[in-house]
Image (cartoon, rainbow, N blue to C red):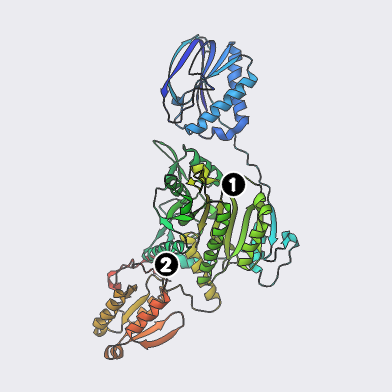
Amino acid sequence: MRLLTIHAEKFWFKAREKALKDAEELVDVPGEARAENALVVFISVEEGDAKGGKEFLEQVARNVVEIAENVKADTIVLYPYAHLSSRLAPPFEAMEVMKSLEEVVKSVFKGKVLRAPFGWYKAFEIKCLGHPLSELSRELKPSAVKRIAIEKEYFILTPDGDLYRPEEYEFKEGEEGLKILVDKEYFKKELPGGKPRIVEICRKFGFEWEPMSDAGHMRYGPHATTILDAVMEYSWRVAKSVGFPVFRVRGTNMFNLKFRPVREHAELFGDRLYELRTDTGTMVMRYAACHQQFAMIKDWIISYRDLPFGAFEVADSYRYEQSGEVMLCFRLRKFFMPDLHIFNKDLEQAMKTAKRVQEVILEEVAKVGQDYWAIYNVTRDFFDEHRDYIIELIRREGRPALIEVLPAGIYYWVLNIEYNIIDALGRPREIATFQIDIGNAKRFGIRYVDEEGNERYPVIIHTALIGGVERYIYMVFDAAVKQEAMGKTPTIPVWLAPIQVRVIPVSRNHLSYAEEVLQRLKEEGIRADLDDRDLGLGKKIRDAGIEWIPYIVVVGDREVSTGTVNVRIRGTREQVSMKVDDLIKRIKEEVRGYPQVDSALPDRLSMRPTLHYLRGL
């Protein structure tokens, strides 16, 4: 906060017109006032001042009153004045600070206290007395905000409804994942480390850190780009599968903290915010799609008949994770979040909708050969009133869950479920999630009209059904690492393979037929390429194996004469001869229900430079 104090023989002001749309109404504050022998305090409220709370305002008041007493002023005039700082607090916040400061100053100053209205263009006249203390300036900052520890209670809740303290629970066979979760979250145990094989696989497919950017920012080579595109498109298909109307939208990735809902939501999110300054204020880089979807949907005209419905976006998101904790493909500062928000009439409808959301989440994790262990973050009031509902959700999962009970009203949600895999290193990794939000509709002004014609605020479910895009890919690669640890050939699903089929002619004499096979595969939307390099057959096959290509098609004299292809199948280690149409049929069956995106690579290997991330792997 910046202050300019002037000891005035006379001072007069008058509000002329509103400078802000939401300027303070001239009801509890005068539109015109005069004062003699007054300490006029011109005040710029800056970013962060509101976080100082009453303690900071008392500090400011002591400074102001001390000056007033030293110059023997009869009146203190608090005058909002934006021109002392370039780091102004948002108007709604600055107005509240000015009001609160007035009350604090009144409580400690024995004379008269006036406050000029906030958000107005004002005329004023001032006659400065001109002594050594008549013009002073101050810059005051709140001390570091002390975080209040949130009281949490932990339990383990079984599908039968039995509730245990974590230290009292006896883990059963098959519950090793739950024990790992409890050890980390409740007992705060340091889990075993090790060199993560999954990081090598990420790099193998072109997922890398960008060294010319900030920590935690990735770049995506051609192989990685294809995988990324496929997962993004698949996340949209999954969102549409929930069974409610879903609208796909797009938006910006930065929002101005001068707007109350944006700022309040950011404060609830916590410290992991990317911020930047522009000529219109301080921006927060979005950490999910909430801001854009809520800012958009508040303008929609919604009836109770429309609910529930969803809004979806793959949002480029930013979280300022600690640089020492970022992990390739998992914990990032910039990532893609396939965010679905489902708007419901009330809590009862939201609880019903959440069952379908849970069902989809569990279906998707099973498809990649993984399973989840859940953490239920729940407010005390919701836990007490809806314990049977929580037990039902856990029963549907078929395994106990860790319950974290928090005080009511500290967040915008009443239930927030985090779904964790246990990765190959034995560490819990949160992938999918959903939460029931009872606060943001009102905060952002999202309304619908109920059966009686009354405006009401919907209850919103936030969910990432498959998790963040990169985290979903992490989960897929982790499944491959676990295959490898069991002595199996590591694979990724065919629909995700950057190249699904590689066609390899034995010699140049077979190139023409190989090109025919390639074109036939491409016509069917299959990502296929052709190794037309002047290299030995063994080298070509090894290179295809390095890229984990599911199907390697070799064509020689026999294949040309019989119109067949010799196929090496990575997943089963089989080598079979078949017609091209049979291969197409097999691949189409494997990718049924999944998107087929274009390849990000040229069709011919002779046209490609050496991709550094494939060297030596």
Q: Is residue 436 above or below residue 280?
A: below
Q: Quadrant of residue 75?
A: top right
For the point 29% across and 80% down, the residue is 517
Mark 1, other Cα within 10 Å: few <14 / some 14–19 / many ≥20: some
Furthest toward the right, the residue is 168
Q: x%, y% of residue 60?
A: 58, 25
Q: Amino acid at mark 1?
A: Tyr
Q: x%, y% of residue 206?
A: 41, 64
Q: In this figure, what is the number of numbered marks?
A: 2
Q: Amino acid at mark 2?
A: Phe
Q: Nearer the viewer, residue 389 or 292?
A: 389
3D distance between C-alphas at marks 2 and 1: 39 Å
| Element under disc 1 | loop
Furthest toward the front, the residue is 452
> Residue 411 — which label?
1
Q: Quadrant of residue 53?
A: top right
Q: Is residue 127 above or below residue 460?
A: above
Q: Nearer the viewer, residue 241 or 516?
A: 241
Mark 2, other Cα within 10 Å: few <14 / some 14–19 / many ≥20: many
| Element under disc 2 | loop
Mark 2 or 1 closer to N-term? 2
Which label lies toward us, 2 or 1?
A: 1
Q: Nearer the viewer, residue 288 or 41?
A: 288
Is residue 542 something one can see in this rendering? Answer: no
Q: Is residue 88 left or right of residue 70?
A: left
Q: Which residue is mark 2?
A: 205
Q: x%, y% of residue 216?
A: 47, 54
Q: Quadrant of the C terminus?
A: bottom left
For the point 51% across and 66% down, the residue is 475
Is residue 219 something one can see in this rendering? Answer: yes
Q: x%, y% of residue 235?
A: 44, 62
For the point 52% across and 51% down, the residue is 345
